[in-house]
Amino acid sequence: MSLYDLVRPALFSLPAETAHETGMTALRAAQGTPIERLARRRLRVDDERLSVAAFGRSFPNPIGVAAGFDKNATVPRMLAALGFGHVEIGGVTAERQAGNPRPRMFRLRADRAIVNRMGFNNHGAEAVGERLATARLPDVPVGLNVGKSKSTPLEAAAGDYEYTFERCGDAVDYTVVNVSSPNTPGLRELQHRDALESILGTLLDAGARPLLVKLSPDLAAEAVDEALTVVDDLDLDGVVATNTTTARPRSLRSPEQAERGGLSGKPLEPVATDFVARVARQTDVPIVGVGGVSDAQGAYAKIRAGASLVQLYTALVYEGPTVAREINRGLLELLEDDGFDHVSEAVGVDC
Ligand SMILES: Cc1cc2nc3c(=O)[nH]c(=O)nc-3n(C[C@H](O)[C@H](O)[C@H](O)COP(=O)(O)O)c2cc1C
């Protein structure tokens, strides 16, 4: 039995977002104290076989924190101390936003899933940029996930993304254009060719490198082709696959599936893994695989499907703060079982 097995019932007795805030408060309190050092000693798996070189950056292991967990970049060092090999902060928008009315985050416990319709609640580019510029950042890569302000019309989206990059981009190791959240009206239309070219082109002109784009698992096949053509044409540095889905697989059992928003966690896992394999077959850029990963087998499946890096959010809720260590340890065993000397050898073997 882990410590989190004892804490989880108390957290799960709270509304999902309150539980998240409680967790964040605990992480903030621990950051910069001896607890951070203790966590680092116990939870980091230091092994050269797990190191990843992708888009010009070095990662100590492939497992990162997905966007949305640390929207305002308040606990990146503590997340690194939990054993994550990178942290993607955000989504940050140009404007400070309150997001949608609460409740807007729901546990689907029987399905080990979450539905959220947060709507990019965040402190805004100015405040997050200030924090990134003044805070001590972790010794693992930090990514910036950029969203669009709700009040900015779709036609003006490029300038909105650029504004955020200008304020936050200098401090981070890579930037992700999020055009795939289902919770900002019209956002996912920005995955189409012209809009994507305009946004990504504007950011490249502004100096955003490495630059990645995060795609929705709900994109139709032709739209995926279109987006990947833009990735190739603009010589982008990578693809993050995937965001949450608005689909509701028939396997779902929890009543909260009726809530509007994006579904993450276990039911998304096979969909996201298939999507990673599809992207891997169509492009040569590094892929960040995300969706439902909660254990070493799941992370390994994403890697074998073509992901160089893997991220998770929902598993932090269900598995707790030791999840990165468990996955990294398990990955070493799986690599050994398959006769791989390094994680890079497993990337894409199944795609
Ligand atoms: C509460 C919540 C908020 C999220 N916010 C963002 C966000 O701001 N930007 C983004 O690109 N993805 C966001 N995501 C999506 C995650 O980054 C990830 O793509 C998705 O949850 C699938 O991974 P998982 O199954 O490991 O959670 C959010 C997810 C959740 C559950």
Image (cartoon, rainbow, N blue to C red):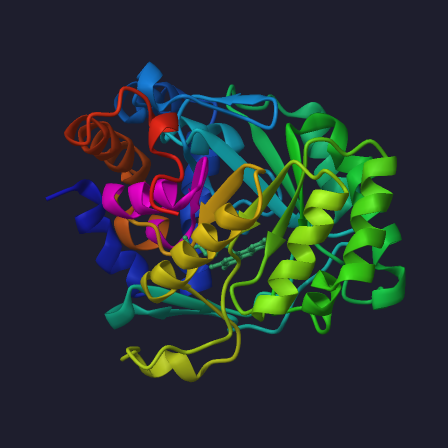
Front-lying residue, 9 or 188: 188
Q: Is residue 89 magenta?
A: no
Q: From which residue to which does the magenta span run?
A: 296-315
Q: Is residue 107 left or right of residue 65?
A: left
Tell me which residue sits at (52%, 71%) in the image: 104
Q: Is residue 248 left or right of residue 174?
A: left
The quadrant where residue 206 appears: top right
* Vertical position of residue 277 compared to residue 246: above or below: above
> Looking at the picture, how far across and down is residue 168, in whole percent?
75, 35
Front-lying residue, 327 or 138: 327
Q: Is residue 297 magenta?
A: yes
Q: Is residue 98 left or right of residue 114?
A: right
Q: Is residue 130 left or right of residue 344?
A: right
Tell me which residue sits at (40%, 21%) in the image: 51
Front-lying residue, 274 or 40: 274
> Looking at the picture, how far across and down is residue 254, in whole percent?
30, 79
